[in-house]
Amino acid sequence: MLTRKQIELLDFIRTRIDRDGVPPSFDEMKDALDLKSKSGIHRLITALEERGFIRRLAHRARALEIVKLPEAMDKAGFKPRVVQGSKPEAPPPRPAAALAVETSYAMEIPMMGRIAAGVPIEAIQHISHHVTVPNALISGKGAHYALEVKGDSMIEAGINDGDIVIIQEQQDAENGDIVVALVEDAEATLKRFRRKGAMIALEAANPLFETRVLPDHKVKVQGKLVGLIRSY
């Protein structure tokens, strides 16, 4: 059985996730429950976690998962919703799947390794694990996968070193799309795509990096950027 304060906090967290898409901060929770310090919130969250109502997601800022609700709060039915904060934690490896089972709010997609946004690194690797992302980051139909960004050549496009990019798998692109490009079957990079006749320009979004122009047969589009998870 939960205490009144535990129920108040659980309901506040649920309401804020439903309204804003992210959990409230500890300061917001403290103010909402009229507590004098955040230590009281820590104790309430720990109690809710121990009783199996919520789960804290390690290494992610302001990330909580509501696992279940008390019967009195669950009249309309409830399905867990995972909200991402910063870079997802790597869970144990699991069987590869292009598309995972979708929930009402989120779905799992495979993490394929790192992608260069700067000096090119090795090509996309095999699936290392899966990450859970909000459905709002999934665009269109077909397979999606995630990559960790390495480098800062796309910072003016809002893509920073360490961010997680969500990629829709496809083999073509429109001018201006940010794509995963496989260059000469040897290196993968994240750049803005532009076709110029029989040549492909891979443009950085950082004036410190030069645009790479290559014959179109040396560039294979592996997918298009459709979403991003910021790493803090």
Image: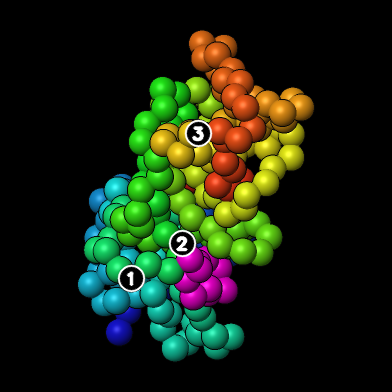
Q: Main secondary structure of the magenta part?
A: loop
Which of marks 2 and 1 precedes in the sequence?
1
Q: Amino acid at mark 2?
A: Ile
Residue 169 visible in the shown view: yes
Circles 3 and 1: CB atoms closer than 8 Å: no
* Residue identified by numbered label 2: 109
Which is more foreground, mark 2 or mark 3? 3
Q: Specify how the rendered protein is coloured.
A: rainbow
Residue 160 visible in the shown view: no
Is residue 158 rendered to the left or right of residue 86? right
* Residue identified by numbered label 1: 95
Q: CA distance from mark 1 to mark 2?
A: 12 Å
Q: Position of residue 40 (x, y in %)?
A: 28, 56
Q: Amino acid at mark 3?
A: Val
Farthest residue, direction top:
208
- Residue at 54% x, 85% y is 77
Q: CA distance from mark 2 to mark 3?
A: 24 Å
- Residue at 68% x, 37% y is 177
Residue range highlighted in magenta: 98-107
- Residue at 66% x, 64% y is 141
Image height of 116 relative to 101, above or below: above
* Residue identified by numbered label 3: 183
Image height of 54 relative to 62, above or below: below
Q: Position of residue 199 (x, y in %)?
A: 68, 26
Query: Is 101 one of the magenta-colored residues?
Result: yes
Farthest residue, direction right:
197
Q: Position of residue 176 (x, y in %)?
A: 71, 32
Q: Front-most of 112 and 13?
A: 112
